Image (cartoon, grey):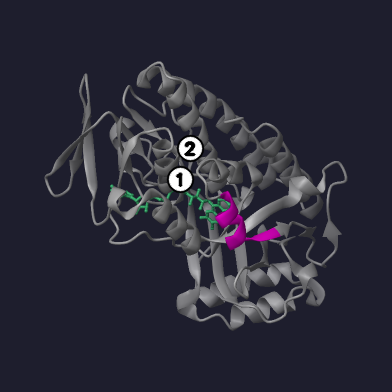
């Protein structure tokens, strides 16, 4: 089976390795000149790590990351956990994104990844799909996978009018900085006033990742550092998190990532006979549930399982679409509930309800 995957992001690379493991002849097309990994660290939950075990990199990914035991805090620094949920519902692995993507690219193999290759569109035929490259070249494949992120061109061609939309003025600021003896009790997430969240967590290699988010962030003025500091002050009542403020203040401007959060609307279809969407291309989510990448890796496991089960590509894709759309309908319900939580205690309870649900209902692949 000749399979072309558009996008060498986290999910495209994982999908390539997953489908190679069942014998697909995979080619990954990436328009950037290198396998990039914008972003500081990514929190990966156990359901994602299982797919990494399947493709043989689970131990290496665990060695790259730091196990984080999430505690939620109110702006005065009081720790909050909902007693109905267990430690396991609060634990994930924080992995530096560049190291992760490099590991995955090495697993797929450089000879299977074509960089500086922009996909301009595709045409489905009875017996193959033609992938049109911006340089005029045409590749023929049995299966085309759009793993090309929130602004997916494969999705736009499949479903006109499905453009990503802004998530209500939601912005995120993040950076990796050298650790300076931050308090372990300061990790991970304070739910502040004015719809802010943020905190920090250790990342392997003597570094700490800080992050600050705000829904309805309003006008952005000043440097990225000023913007992040302004929001972080909502997390730092009565001296709690002065260390976070100091960390942001000492972060070089160029090291700060600022993201306007975009969402992919619920789609009416994820597949065609020979084409499938995966990862953010299918379901770009808000990061306030820290699980979009994890669930994209889960997509790869389900797609692999269904394609291996056959009997033909179209039937397997239809099963993949049915199960993923049903799962994401629930994800969206949880995501909205967490977003609308009133205060730190409700946020913590709804977040734990989501992670518990995600972990305990993850598909066996
Ligand atoms: C602030 C923030 C924090 C987050 N935190 C977490 C977290 O803690 N845990 C978690 O699980 N998830 C998290 N997420 C979500 C996670 O980052 C994404 O779900 C994940 O990175 C999506 O990966 P992807 O491979 O689907 O898409 P992308 O990483 O966007 O990759 C798409 C790739 O396709 C390429 N491409 C696009 N168009 C074309 C084209 N036409 N031709 C060729 N190549 C193309 C792009 O260059 C890119 O390399 C967070 C997101 C944000 C914004």
Q: Quadrant of the N terminus?
A: top left
Q: Nearer the viewer, residue 188 or 139?
A: 139
Q: Quadrant of the C terminus?
A: top right
Q: Could you say whether the residue bearing mark 1 is in a helix, strand or loop?
A: helix
Q: Residue at x 59, y 84 (%)?
A: 250
Magenta-span inclusion, residue 128: no
In the depicted structure, whether residue 304 falls above or below residue 51? above
Q: Is residue 243 left or right of residue 6?
A: right
Looking at the image, which residue sits at the far left? 136
- Residue 327 place in picture, x, y as percent: 58, 30
Q: Could you say whether the residue bearing mark 2 is in a helix, strand or loop?
A: helix
- Residue 174 place in picture, x, y as percent: 55, 67
Residue 160 visible? The answer is no
Q: Are marks 2 and 1 in contact (CB under 8 Å)?
A: yes
- Local packing at callout 1 (Cα closer than 10 Å; few below 14, some 14-19, many 20+) is many
Ligand 1 under 8 Å from disc 1 Cβ: yes
Q: Residue at x 50, y 43 (%)?
A: 55
Q: Residue at x 54, y 24 (%)?
A: 323
* Residue 242 badge: none
Q: Residue at x 79, y 77 (%)?
A: 239
Magenta-colored span: 58-67
- Residue 176 place in picture, x, y as percent: 56, 72
First along the sequence among labels 2 and 1: 1
Q: How many marks?
A: 2
Q: Quadrant of residue 41?
A: bottom right
* Residue 300 badge: 2
Q: Nearer the viewer, residue 214 or 102?
A: 102
Looking at the image, which residue sits at the far right? 83
Residue ID for mark 1: 14
Residue 145 visible? The answer is yes
C-alpha gap between disc 2 and disc 1: 7 Å
């Amino acid at each position: 089976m000749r399979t072309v995957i558009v996008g060498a992001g986290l999910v495209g690379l994982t999908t390539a390795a997953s489908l190679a493991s069942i014998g697909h002849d995979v080619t990954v097309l990436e328009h950037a000149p290198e396998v990039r990994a914008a972003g500081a660290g990514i929190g990966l939950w156990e359901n994602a790590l299982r797919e990494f075990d399947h493709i043989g990199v689970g131990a290496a990914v665990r060695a790259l990351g730091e196990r984080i035991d999430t505690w939620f805090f109110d702006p005065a620094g009081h720790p909050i956990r909902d007693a109905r949920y267990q430690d396991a519902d609060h634990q994930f692995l924080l992995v530096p994104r560049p190291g992760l993507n490099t590991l995955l690219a090495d697993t797929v193999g450089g000879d299977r990844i074509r960089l500086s290759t922009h996909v301009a569109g595709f045409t489905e035929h009875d017996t193959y799909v033609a992938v049109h490259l911006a340089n005029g070249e045409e590749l023929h494949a049995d299966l085309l996978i759009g793993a090309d992120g929130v602004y997916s061109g494969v999705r736009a061609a499949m479903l006109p009018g499905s453009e990503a939309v802004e998530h209500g003025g939601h912005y995120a600021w993040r950076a990796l900085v050298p650790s300076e003896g931050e308090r372990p009790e300061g990790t991970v997430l304070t739910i502040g006033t004015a719809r802010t969240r943020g905190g920090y967590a250790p990342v392997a290699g003597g570094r700490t990742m800080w992050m600050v988010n705000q829904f309805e962030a309003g006008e952005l003025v000043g440097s990225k550092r000023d913007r992040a500091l302004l929001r972080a002050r909502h997390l730092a009542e009565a001296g709690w998190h002065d260390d976070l403020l100091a960390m942001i203040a000492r972060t070089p401007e160029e090291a700060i990532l600022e993201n306007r959060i975009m969402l992919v609307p619920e789609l009416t279809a994820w597949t065609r006979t020979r084409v499938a969407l995966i990862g953010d291309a299918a379901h770009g989510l808000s990061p306030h549930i820290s699980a979009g990448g994890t669930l994209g890796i889960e997509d790869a496991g389900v797609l692999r399982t269904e394609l291996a089960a056959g009997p033909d590509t179209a039937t397997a894709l239809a099963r993949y679409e049915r199960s993923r759309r049903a799962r994401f309908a629930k994800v969206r319900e949880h995501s909205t509930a967490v977003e609308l939580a009133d205060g730190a205690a409700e946020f913590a309870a709804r977040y734990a309800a989501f992670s518990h649900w995600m972990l305990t209902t993850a598909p066996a692949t």
